[in-house]
Amino acid sequence: MKMKGIAAVYFSPTGSTKRAVMEIADGIARKAGLPVREVDFTLPGAREEVRKFEAGQLVIFGTPVYAGRIPNKILPAVQTLFEGNGALAVPVVTFGNRSFDNALIELRIELEQHGFHTIAGAAFVAEHVFSKKLAAGRPDENDLQVIRRFAEDIAVKIEGIKEGDQDGMAEIPAPVAVKGIEPVPSYYRPLQEDGTPANFLKAKPKTADSCNDCGICARVCPMGSISPEDCRTVTGICIKCQACVKACPEGAKYFDDPIMLSHTRMLEQNYARRAENEVFL
Ligand SMILES: Cc1cc2nc3c(=O)[nH]c(=O)nc-3n(C[C@H](O)[C@H](O)[C@H](O)COP(=O)(O)O)c2cc1C
């Protein structure tokens, strides 16, 4: 089958998911001689309009893994803002060395429910935003090779899909089989170092004196929860994505919630091994 267009769609507060999705989309687009339509729905302003796709298009669709699933505050956007109308799709998740649990299957289910035909899927390892010790420096050269190979395999798979009489496919491909439990179970429950549950839902970023009110943190917050007038004030929900922490040029944003820090240490102690990327075609 000949593709009509390629789109890269992602939610990516700190850039790892964007990187994986763009690497795949660019790889396929180069081969097919097509441009990439980029749809970044990380910021609140980008979650106001419905994006429509159509048969013959390929959509690489990525989110990070939060608590083993699609980030819960972003799930409604995934469910309401994208209409596949018969487009092909590739669900992609990135995860920080613990596990992607049921995030990939959840994304596949959502895409199938909203008019996409999923033909491949993948979970890629990326540095955990809570700790530079978890999947440090990943994606590395080996990971990039896996991602590029995945892009090539998708292109070959699409070439092998038979064209139909009118502008579509002769047969609708079966949803890609990916790892995960269906129906999707509840979220992963974080633990503290001592094995007790870690509830840090109320944790918010704090601001050191080095803050010079440049406003970058307010502009990068995916929830629009940092006041542009006073960067020290968190006005709404915090999803702990670390966008503000990573973007602050002064290094002034930080979390000091003891339960959240205990959870991070638990992860560092128990998930130090090299987690593997997983691709499904
Ligand atoms: C709130 C939260 C929950 C997370 N939960 C998981 C998880 O369950 N398993 C895992 O391996 N990584 C987890 N991570 C790490 C992210 O999936 C990982 O760092 C991801 O690559 C970040 O993507 P981004 O750079 O596109 O924002 C979590 C991160 C956050 C902020």
Image (cartoon, rainbow, N blue to C red):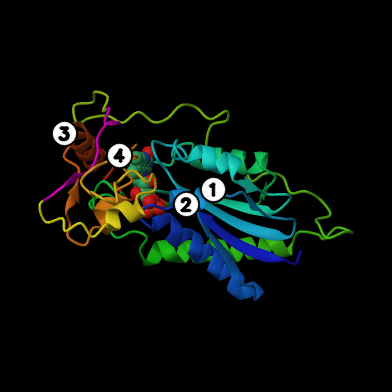
- What label sits on residue 258 in the rendered view? 3
Q: Quadrant of ligand 1?
A: top left
> Is the CB–ligand 1 distance for label 2 below 8 Å?
no
Q: Nearer the viewer, residue 45 or 63?
A: 45
In this rendering, the label closer to the viewer, 2 or 3: 2
Inter-mark Cα distance, 2 to 3: 33 Å
Mark 2 and mark 1 in contact (Cβ < 8 Å)?
yes
Dot 2: element: helix
**Residue picked out by circle 2:** 45
- Decide whether residue 194 is among the magenta residues: no
What are the residue bounds of the magenta stretch?
A: 199-208
- Judge the density around disc 4: few (<14), some (14-19), many (≥20) Cα neighbours within 10 Å: few
**Residue picked out by circle 4:** 235
Q: Position of residue 142 (x, y in %)?
A: 40, 64
**Residue picked out by circle 1:** 48
Inter-mark Cα distance, 1 to 3: 36 Å
Amino acid carrying label 4: it is Thr
Q: Position of residue 17 (x, y in %)?
A: 43, 55
Q: Position of residue 56 (x, y in %)?
A: 74, 60
User: Does 182 sit above or below residue 232?
Assistant: above
